[in-house]
Image: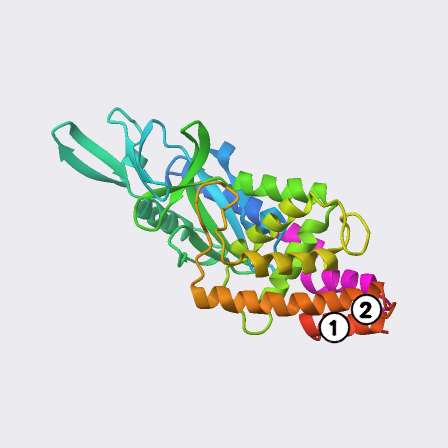
Amino acid sequence: MATNVNAAFSKFINEEINISKSSSDLAKNCRDYLFNQIHSLSSSGKFVPLASLYDISFGSFSRKTKIYPLDDIDVIVGLDGGKITLHVYNWDNIKLTVDNDSTNNALRNLCDVYNGYAGRRYVINSNKVKNKLVNALSNLNNYSKADLHARGEAVTLNLKSYTWNNIVPAFSCIYYNDNQYYLIPNGRGNWKFTNPKLEQERVSRLNVEFNGVVLSTIRLLKYWKKRGKMPNITSYVLETITLDYFDQAKHSGYNSKGMSYDCPDDHFSGALKYIRDHIFYTIHDSKGVQNDINDLNYSQKMALRNRAGADYDKSIDAITAEIYEKNDKKSINIWRDIFGERFPKYE
């Protein structure tokens, strides 16, 4: 129950969408325990040498855009490659060779070996690295199973008492064309560029500029995505196009309620309009690596455009009822039509 729209959104976000502090703290403890366990496996020779300096969390939980339930945690484990050489064919197709004088035998054992006119080449096979990690993790008693993630980038690990984890082995602090990248498995035996830190920095920067409302808006849109028949737009693409909306919205300095940057319902409405108007355009990833992450086909884009447009029109009716008609009950009922019965009723 709620007596006004702001109270309804606050209750909805806090009780139905946000992850509780206790769950978040437990997940962080689980993540830290996992890092320690993987490094102990490396120290005992069950996995390759690691570089703990480059261990990082990534994904929506790390960016604080994850919504309830908390069903996965993503981490990157830094590999110690020593002297390696990059052979870049594309951003998502990179071969890594170990120098012939390398003493990292554990890594050499995970290479494909080629004999040519220039001598023997050791090419690091990312699939072999992941399989080695799977075998190493099978030694842990606290996990129910270890298997490869369906996307081929990560190893998926289920914790008996809690949630599951995506573990991505990566070579870190790789410089190419004056930029710094992580190199992660591409699912086909080679490697690809990524840099989750750039994604995190973009989310954090915009959230500060908009007084904390960016995270709430992204979570609202992810909840909206789960309702009804929705084209299979990934959470990351939806998050990125929402950040694009905020990048253009920051130039206006106001919203339809006449307040500055602090109304998630208003920005939710604005983001729907932005999606409606831009879903057929290129969506660049926040890392600046991929040219276009918008992989929806024409019919999917049209369906999402129509759904976003219809709900945008409803959201304008809801805002009009609240601000101009002073009718919170009518407004809340419209928002319930958009978000479903879990949205609080008018009291």
Which SS class for mark 2?
Answer: helix
Where does the N terminus fall, quadrant-wise?
bottom right
Residue occupying image coordinates x 76% and y 68%: 318
Residue 177, picture quadrant: top left
**Side of 295 where 187 appears, left or right:** left
Please, is residue 104 above or below residue 37 in the view? above
Tell me if residue 29 can be seen.
no
Where does the C terminus fall, quadrant-wise?
bottom right
- Dominant SS in magenta: helix
Residue occupying image coordinates x 58% and y 69%: 307
Dot 2 alpha-carbon crowd within 10 angstroms: few under 14, some 14 to 19, many 20 or more: some
Which residue is tagged 2?
A: 321
Q: What stretch is highlighted in magenta?
A: 1-29
**Outermost residue to the left:** 117
Q: Is residue 2 magenta?
A: yes
Considering only order in the chain, which callout, 2 or 1, is on the residue closer to the N terminus?
2
Q: Which residue is more in the foreground, 331 or 16?
A: 331
Residue 317 picture location, percent across and down: 75, 69
Q: How far apart are marks 1 and 2 (CA)?
A: 9 Å
Please, is residue 253 above or below residue 121 in the view? below
Dot 1 alpha-carbon crowd within 10 angstroms: few under 14, some 14 to 19, many 20 or more: many
**Side of 125 where 222 appears, left or right:** right
> Residue 8 bears which disc, if any?
none
Residue occupying image coordinates x 58% and y 65%: 225
Residue 75 picture location, percent across and down: 51, 46
Q: Do the residues labelled 1 and 2 touch (CB within 8 Å)?
A: yes
Which SS class for mark 1?
Answer: helix
Q: Which residue is more in the foreground, 135 or 44?
A: 135
Residue type, label 2? Ala
- The number of numbered badges drawn on the structure is 2
Which residue is tagged 1?
A: 334
Residue type, label 1? Ile
